[in-house]
Image (cartoon, rainbow, N blue to C red):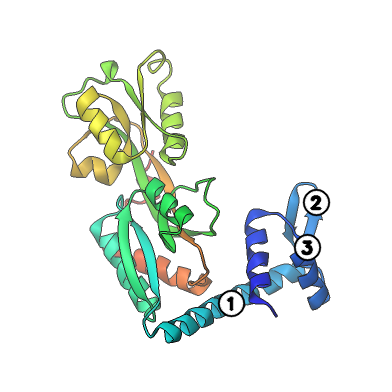
Amino acid sequence: MDSKVLKHFLKIVQLGSLTAQIKKLEQHMGFRLLNRTNKGVSLTPEGQHMLPEIMAMVRTAEQLQRKVDQLRQHAPTTLHIALNSTFSLDINHSIMNFMMDTLHGYRIVFSSSESPENLTKLANGDADMGMVIGCPAQCDDPMYLIDALKVPIVAAMAPGTTLALAPLIKPVAECAYVRVFERFVAMYQPWVQGKAVYDSGSEQVSMSLMKSQGGVGMVSQAIAEAHQLTVVPDFMDALDVYLAMKNPLLDNQDIAALNALLSLPATSVPPASAWV
């Protein structure tokens, strides 16, 4: 069975579209894998039963191909993994150690940047995996929820800033923080009406605008504490964390093991009960 067809099936399950290749796969198996509706496709009971097996076969095929390439080149295959600079050093160290232990057959090159840059790396082929905050609509790669991590987001400003006079720092549409900003604006109406607005594509830009323009913007609680920013009281939100993978090198058991590791006290984040 052609692993490319199986990989295409996983992509369709993720995106909800159908091609002729899947019809051939269903003919080969002798039963339907997907239900077709005007709204897209969904897994049949047989498809749900086969999905874990197909994921395992695709992963095995990918690993086999990488092993073949490795033997041809007489050198380990390089994987590029983009960590998230919003995370603490402890969290990123735990992720690094897990990846090196689990993917020990590869030469791993780590980088660290914010979610929008990690998404760009994935889209350009400069990363094989990437940690992203929030669930971006523009990511074409499979996303796996890391439910052991949530990132608390606060509205913050530079020390000495007067909230009543502060302009707004709005995350761009590609940034997951924009949904937190919209909630903040809704909560603080009509105070925010008529205020000047500066666009920001990253936490670093937001912090720069806080200092240079006296603005109030959205940053992670950890960043606010590390830079001693003034936090707007009575507002906090939280965003989920996802691992995006171009190829399924980690299976569901691996994701569960990563979640278990990140649930340990050394890498914990404030509990959900602390969020308002």
What element does badge 3 sit on? Answer: helix
What element does badge 1 sit on? Answer: helix
Disc 1 target residue: 56
Callout 1: 10 Å neighbours few (<14), some, many (20+)? some
Q: CA distance from mark 2 to mark 3?
A: 16 Å
Q: Is residue 12 above or below residue 47?
A: above
Residue 269: image quadrant is bottom left
Q: Quadrant of the C terminus?
A: top left
> Could you tell me which residue is drawn at 46 percent across and 68 percent down?
255
Disc 2 target residue: 37
Q: CA distance from mark 1 to mark 2?
A: 27 Å
Labels 2, 3: front one: 3
* Residue type highlighted by circle 1: Ala
Disc 3 target residue: 20
Can residue 157 be spotted in the picture?
Answer: no
Q: Is residue 161 above or below residue 175?
A: above
What element does badge 2 sit on? Answer: strand
